[in-house]
Image (tube, rainbow, N blue to C red):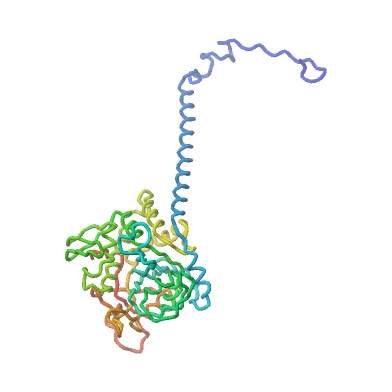
Amino acid sequence: MTDRAGTPAEPDPPAPEDGEPGGTGAEDAGTEDAAPGGPGRRRRHWLRWTALGVSVVVLGAAGAGWWFYRKLDGNITTDTTAADELRRYEKERPPAGSSAARNILLIGSDTRSGEGNERYGRDKGTQRSDTMILLHLSAGRKSATAVSLPRDLMVTVPSCRKPDGTRTREQFAQFNLAFEVGGTACTIRTVEKLTGTRVDHHMVIDFQGFKKMVDAVDGVEVCLKEPVDDEDAHLKLPAGRQTLHGEQALGFVRARKSLGNGSDTERMDRQQQFLGALVNKVQSNGVLLNPARLYPVLDAATKSITTDAGLDSLRDLYDLARSMRAIPTERVQFLTVPRRPYTYNANRDELVQPAASQLFEELREDRPVVVKPGEPGERTGSRKPDGAEASSSPAPTPTFTGRNAAEGACS
């Protein structure tokens, strides 16, 4: 052999025998760890399998996380029809606010269509808004104000596009007619005309969705002064403190004839109490910080809602929930728009002025709304601040009757 052309190569040295220096014998291996089956080899073997196991777990967790994300994200239904209709009326809508404050219209639909909803009545091909709440989130997310808008409130419903493509005429009618004839877009336009406030986002939830949300947090506690037996609401409960789950919770917030004086006013008060207790429970029992408890809530929520394109992804909803997480429960407030019995029909409502306009202005300007407890079923929705009297000084901040989430349903 040669190292290069023309140069003889030196012979290779002989291979050492076992036991000689440089051999493979156990005596000269440096340590006994190198021996077959020795502790060092077992340790390296164990480390390799540990690394492989950790890799499998990490990849499996990542895969499961992605699967859960895709599943939850795919649960959400997007309402594109409303956005298309609203674009046609952009010029007549209130301007979008310049701050980071947001107004979200929450619509509880009484539709009987869909799985599980048929038990609440026959589906006539239409739906009305059983509950309507305008949720205002302050720019700094330091407060949240939920304003109930009575379904029996008499308002001007604009000309709206019906599902069959025809259009309705503008009419002065009961508020929940807007959702029946023109769906979400018509309802949003009605709210914006009524309040002068821009609706940034909307969510629609039906009966089944509400029940699943309550079950996902293991029920909500309420207090009943008297037993309830309401066949229409599918509700039969003893008096006292108790925890309501899905079906019972739905009956509790829907019941009208068997609780209180049978008015929609008291029913809205009861809905606000229940929602406040629900918010309080979610924030107090670590749901938002515990993945095992958060997933069922997210699964129920995403399956139950129809939203605009701005809230139709899990990331959008998570960002919204995260921004609200730091709001103290005492700053999550519930109230009903100031109203009284309608002049021509005591079974309907009309706004109380100037209190209603003052409330809408507070929301538009993103100013804090002050609420105080009122008498059960009080319909005016507002009071003068304690000790306030007529004077030439600037008008004091208006105070409205309502409650906050910290009070719960048994306060």
Quadrant where the C terminus is found in the figure = bottom left
| Residue 172 in the image, given as x and y percentages of width and height | 39, 81
Q: Nearer the viewer, residue 299 or 355?
A: 299
Q: Residue at x 50, y 71 (%)?
A: 85
Quarter residue 228 falls in: bottom left
Viewer-closest of 129 and 126: 126
Depth check, front residue: 247 or 363: 247
Residue 80 in the image, given as x and y percentages of width and height: 49, 64
Q: Could you say which quadrant of the image residue 141 lies in?
A: bottom left
Q: Position of residue 41 (x, y in %)?
A: 49, 23
- Does the image show residue 345? yes
Residue shown at the point (26%, 72%) measured from the top left: 266
Quarter that holds the N terminus: top right
Q: Is residue 143 visible?
A: no
x and y, in percent, of residue 315 in the image? 47, 56
Counting every numbered tag in the picture gives 0
